[in-house]
Image (cartoon, rainbow, N blue to C red):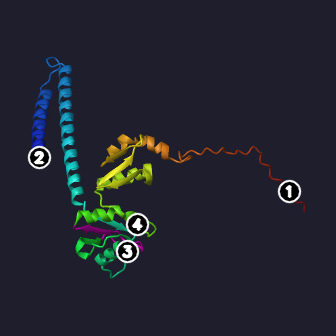
């Protein structure tokens, strides 16, 4: 973090210095003694410097964000989210989780003391139960519960990893473009099946689009007739409208 702040300070000082020199030369420029080509060359050099500085800064920020994302993922490795567990107004979430897990999994060592913290997430919206965040004390017990998630099939309860915002968005984008059968999560990573049939572990949308370009996946997954232009031929009436008959009344 300190190195990034120092780099930003150095870039700021060089930027202001170069800008001041360029402005001074521009104000003192006289067409007879200072050709326009000289000013243009100075501007080009200055522009290249700014673009290089911004590129370097962007790379450092991206590296920092990636390191923060990795650290946050490591902090979440003992956490599992449970969706679909019925919710009541006066419930003991810890006891509910222990009961649900023991009824569906072979985990005799599981008890209330095996859970570090456990609570519902978000606000109550309608009758849909909120997901439950469960953090285990032991990583091995967490993995045993996670790899036994198929035992919940048909119960309406599903297990999910507690992904970071960036990785969750990447996973949702992969599911939308590739379908449920070609992507899943494992140890905080998003696993996708590539066009070559091989598994790729990714953590960002840029990595996803490097495997599956967005334009290609959209064209492959888009259903027929969704281009916004109707392919059904229009029927144009060629009948000439009949003139209204005028009836004269004689008194």
Point out the residue furthest to the right here. Answer: 251
Q: Quadrant of residue 150?
A: bottom left
Secondary structure state at the residue bearing disc 2: helix
Kindly identify which residue carries mark 2: 5
Secondary structure state at the residue bearing disc 1: loop
Kindly identify which residue carries mark 4: 151
Question: Would you say the residues marked 2 and 1 are in contact, meaning their CB atoms lie under 8 Å apart?
Answer: no
Point out the residue furthest to the bottom here. Answer: 90
Disc ID at residue 247: 1
Q: Nearer the viewer, residue 184 or 171?
A: 184
Q: Is residue 122 magenta?
A: yes
Query: Alpha carbon of mark 3 to alpha carbon of mark 1: how far?
Result: 87 Å
Secondary structure state at the residue bearing disc 4: helix
Query: Alpha carbon of mark 1 to alpha carbon of mark 4: how far?
Result: 83 Å
Q: Where is residue 43? Give x, y as percent.
A: 19, 28
Q: Nearer the viewer, residue 63 or 248?
A: 63
Q: Quadrant of the C terminus?
A: bottom right
Extent of the magenta region:
120-137
Query: Alpha carbon of mark 4 to alpha carbon of mark 2: how far?
Result: 50 Å
Residue visible at 31% across and 47% down? 202
Is residue 157 shown left or right of residue 11?
right
Q: Tell me the mark number nearer the camera, choosing from 4 and 2.
A: 4
Mark 1 or mark 4, earlier in chain: 4
Q: Residues within 10 Å of mark 4 (few under 14, many from 20)?
A: some
Q: Residues within 10 Å of mark 2 (few under 14, many from 20)?
A: few
Q: Where is residue 204? Give x, y as percent.
A: 31, 48
Point out the residue furthest to the top here. Answer: 32
Query: Alpha carbon of mark 3 to alpha carbon of mark 4: how far?
Result: 10 Å
Query: Alpha carbon of mark 2 to alpha carbon of mark 1: how far?
Result: 93 Å
Mark 3 or mark 4, earlier in chain: 3
Question: Would you say the residues marked 2 and 3 are in contact, meaning their CB atoms lie under 8 Å apart?
Answer: no
């Amino acid at each position: 973090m300190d190195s990034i702040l120092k780099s930003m300070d150095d870039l700021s000082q060089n930027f202001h210095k170069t800008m001041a020199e360029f402005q001074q030369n521009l104000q003192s420029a006289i067409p007879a003694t200072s050709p326009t080509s000289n000013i243009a060359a100075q501007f080009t050099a200055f522009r290249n410097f700014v673009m290089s500085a911004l590129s370097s800064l962007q790379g450092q920020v991206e590296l920092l964000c990636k390191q923060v994302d990795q650290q946050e993922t490591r902090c979440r490795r003992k956490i599992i989210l449970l969706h679909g567990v019925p919710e009541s107004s006066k419930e003991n979430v810890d006891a509910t989780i222990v009961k649900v897990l023991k009824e569906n999994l072979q985990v005799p060592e599981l008890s209330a003391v095996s859970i570090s913290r456990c609570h519902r997430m978000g606000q109550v919206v309608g009758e849909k139960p909120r997901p439950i965040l469960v953090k285990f004390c032991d990583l091995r017990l967490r993995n045993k519960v996670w790899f036994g998630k198929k035992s919940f099939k048909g119960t309406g309860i599903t297990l999910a990893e507690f992904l970071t915002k960036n990785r969750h968005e990447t996973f949702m984008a992969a599911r939308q473009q590739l379908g449920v059968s070609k992507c899943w999560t494992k140890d905080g990573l998003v696993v996708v099946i590539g066009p070559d049939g091989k598994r790729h572990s990714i953590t960002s949308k840029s990595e996803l689009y490097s495997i599956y370009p967005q334009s290609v996946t959209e064209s492959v997954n888009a259903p027929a007739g969704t281009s916004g232009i109707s392919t059904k031929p229009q029927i144009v009436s060629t009948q000439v409208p009949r003139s209204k008959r005028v009836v004269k009344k004689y008194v």
